[in-house]
Image: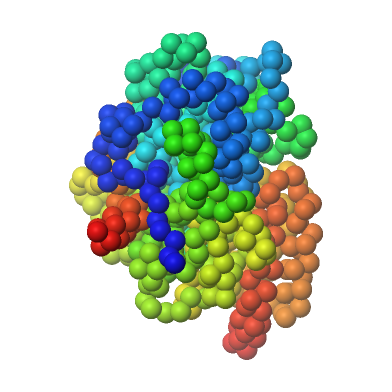
């Protein structure tokens, strides 16, 4: 049986005013907030725990558990920080969400802040995207106007201020501790963990950092209950997710579906392959997770099944490439990206990405030797696990992953270019 | 050019939004760019005085972030994504076309100061590849022809609409939006077929089921 699409966050995106308070409230927007106040902070955390919601930013950490790590009655201010610094190659779900449905994010922010006892929340939006910044700022302003933000929200006694913050062009700031440094007005470099942000995050106070889609998913869970959410997906990967399918398909775009849908189903929903060329490889969730091939199209898109297949669900934004694609070129551009975005803090990542690009460029110019492939594998291994943050691991991913399935193509490029030189 | 008293008031307004004023530094530098067209030395000095840091500390922050430019940007900033997805779907050709058309390379400004061209990294719009930006507004689903048309329309001073965003203004104008000041353009239509792809598919299938 085909997995059906389940529009939840996207259900009213075809309303002309889906981004406004009126448009959001027409379909029950902000009704979850009242239920949250009734359930109480611990009640909300319990519902989110029970729902099994996992972080939609890539790591898939259980959201309710993360909230539970925040120490209570510690006398310190708590902060909620929304990571909307969407920058991973392939990832393109949070930007459309903020354009089309910013109030789901704002309502999610209020409920989540209430749960973790934060009176101050920040939405860190990627700087290069003025339109989501406009829309989220307007949504926050409208929420203040309607008494949904500020002091004593709806008579609950709960106060919350929300700041919409713009980044300035640094992929690394999607890493949660680099994001915190950036939000403190510093260079966005990752911090060593522990201490984890739940204990010492923004301004050294307990902080929860969640992806924008994660937070926007909260109101529907509160409204419909944990059981409703768990009725979708699998036991370990419950719920619904935004899948942004890009590349060589006929209708690239946003497809909201339960976890566990397969890539074959998503490609079918997207109208099939673009020029009816066969699929060559695909990547489940951003360039930092290993690629798969046509042999893996029927594996459920869940955290656990992707891990078993040797990759990760990541951001759940699959990139599809047909046989017209040079895997060598794709890999070079991804590594160049990681070189550009390496913050320079850790030597293996800073130097490793530099040398990998150098060698790959050599390959492109026909000056490489077959032994350079071993060298690239070696450098990848030297970066992986030897840097503060996941950017290093990400940089070490594309080449070995591509080599696993397309070694001959790399060899051919080296030999052919060599012959031409 | 000098940073006016009015701008300093706005810089302080940004600082007042945060529990700790240094948190406003990125928005403040965006605001400086909206006034100066780049992060000038004077802008750095003003921010340093306002936040209470040394100019070296502010420079260290400014130089870390790709969006902060240390030389004047043209009236319009043109970005062409050449990361893997866009490059393979035509971004490389768009880059070559525009680079030739403008006689400018990566991070270069045309002699008439109209355009600054930049090879940008993934713009979080892969479903709309190949992607180009004008003053960071999305120009989705580009072709070489469409990209060349965008440039010639901008040259001719014609009105231009971003595909998912606002009408095109100048680099400085949009920097002000990014810094966190309203521009009244929030309601411009910006939902397209790709964003509705799944919803439309769902609606079609439920219709068929009845």
Q: Is residue A171 left or right of residue A386?
A: left
In terms of image quadrants, where is residue B49? Answer: top right
In x, y percent, where is residue A83?
55, 37
A280 in relation to B90, above or below: below
Q: Compared to A351, does B174 lie above or below?
A: above
Name the quadrant of the C terminus of chain A. bottom right
Q: Position of residue A246 (x, y in %)?
A: 44, 61
Residue A232 vertical placement versus A68 (above, below):
below
Task: Evaluate whether residue A343 shows in this view.
Answer: yes
Q: Residue at x 40, y 56 (%)?
A: A5
Task: Judge left or right: residue B40 versus residue A290.
Answer: left
Q: Is residue A175 visible?
A: no
Relative to the observer, which residue lies in front, A173 or A111? A111
> Which residue is painted at 76% across and 49% down in the image?
A387
User: On screen, A290 above or below A213?
Assistant: below
Q: How many marks?
A: 0
- Furthest toward the bottom, the residue is A419
Residue at 49% in and 60% down? A261
**Is residue A302 found left or right of A155 in the rendered image?**
right
- Quadrant of the drawing holding the N terminus of chain A: bottom left
Q: Residue at x 26, y 36 (%)?
A: A17
In the image, A367 versus A70, the foreground residue is: A70
User: Which residue occupies the foreground of this view, A28 or A421?
Assistant: A28
Residue A404: % across, % down: 68, 74
Q: Position of residue A54 (x, y in %)?
A: 59, 44
Residue nearest the viewer, comparing A419 with A154: A154
Coloring applied to the structure: rainbow
């Amino acid at each position: 049986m085909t997995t059906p699409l389940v529009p939840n966050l996207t259900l009213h995106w075809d309303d002309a005013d889906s981004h406004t308070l009126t448009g959001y409230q027409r379909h029950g927007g902000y009704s979850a907030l009242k239920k949250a106040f009734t359930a109480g902070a611990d009640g909300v955390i319990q519902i989110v725990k029970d729902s099994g919601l996992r972080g939609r930013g890539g790591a898939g950490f259980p959201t309710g558990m993360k909230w539970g790590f925040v120490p209570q009655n510690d006398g310190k201010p708590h902060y909620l920080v929304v990571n909307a610094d969407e920058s991973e190659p392939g990832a393109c779900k949070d930007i459309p969400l903020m354009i089309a449905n910013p109030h789901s994010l704002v309502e999610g922010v209020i409920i989540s802040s209430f749960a973790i006892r934060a009176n101050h929340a920040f939405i860190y939006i990627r700087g290069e995207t003025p339109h989501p910044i406009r829309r989220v700022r307007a949504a926050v302003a409208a929420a203040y106007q309607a008494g949904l933000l500020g002091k004593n929200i709806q008579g609950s006694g709960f106060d919350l201020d929300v700041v919409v913050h713009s980044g300035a062009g640094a992929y690394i700031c999607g890493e949660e501790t680099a994001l915190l440094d950036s939000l403190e007005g510093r260079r966005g470099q990752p911090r060593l963990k522990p201490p984890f942000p739940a204990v010492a995050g923004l301004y050294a106070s307990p902080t929860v950092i969640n992806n924008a889609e994660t937070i926007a998913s909260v109101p529907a869970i509160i409204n419909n209950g944990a059981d409703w959410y768990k009725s979708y997906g699998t036991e370990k990967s419950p719920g619904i997710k935004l899948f942004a399918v890009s590349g060589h398909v006929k209708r690239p775009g946003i497809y909201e579906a339960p976890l566990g849908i397969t890539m074959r189903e998503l490609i079918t929903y997207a109208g099939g392959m673009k020029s009816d060329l066969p699929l060559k490889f695909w990547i489940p969730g951003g360039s930092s997770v290993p690629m798969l091939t046509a042999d893996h199209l029927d594996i459920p898109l869940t955290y656990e099944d992707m891990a078993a297949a040797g990759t990760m669900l990541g951001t759940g934004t699959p990139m599809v490439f047909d046989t017209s694609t040079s895997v060598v070129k794709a890999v070079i551009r991804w590594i160049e990206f990681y070189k550009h975005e390496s913050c320079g803090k850790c030597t293996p990542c800073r130097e490793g990405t530099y040398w990998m690009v150098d060698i790959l460029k050599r390959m492109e110019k026909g000056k490489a030797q077959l032994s350079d492939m071993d060298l690239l594998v070696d450098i990848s291994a030297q970066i992986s696990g030897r840097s503060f943050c996941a950017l290093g691991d990400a940089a070490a991913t594309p080449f070995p992953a591509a080599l696993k399935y397309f070694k001959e193509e790399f060899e051919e490029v080296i030999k052919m270019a060599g012959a031409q030189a | 050019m000098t940073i006016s008293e009015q701008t300093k008031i706005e810089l302080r307004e940004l600082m007042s939004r945060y529990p700790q004023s240094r948190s406003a530094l990125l928005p403040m530098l965006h605001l400086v760019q909206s006034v100066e067209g780049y992060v000038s030395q004077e802008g750095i000095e003003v921010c340093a005085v306002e936040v209470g840091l040394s100019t070296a500390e502010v420079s260290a922050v400014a130089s870390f972030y790709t969006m902060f430019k240390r030389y004047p940007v043209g009236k319009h900033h043109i970005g062409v994504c050449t990361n893997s997805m866009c490059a393979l779907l035509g971004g490389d050709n768009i880059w070559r076309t525009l680079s030739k058309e403008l006689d400018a390379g990566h991070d270069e400004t045309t002699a008439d100061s109209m355009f600054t061209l930049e090879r940008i990294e993934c713009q979080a719009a892969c479903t709309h590849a190949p992607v180009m930006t004008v003053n960071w507004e999305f120009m989705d689903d580009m072709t070489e022809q469409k990209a060349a048309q965008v440039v010639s329309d901008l040259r001719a001073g014609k009105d231009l609409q971003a595909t998912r965003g606002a009408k095109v203004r100048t680099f400085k104008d949009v920097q002000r939006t990014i810094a966190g000041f309203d521009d009244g353009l929030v309601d411009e239509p910006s939902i397209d077929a790709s964003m509705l792809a799944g919803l439309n598919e769902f609606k079609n299938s439920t219709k068929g089921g009845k």
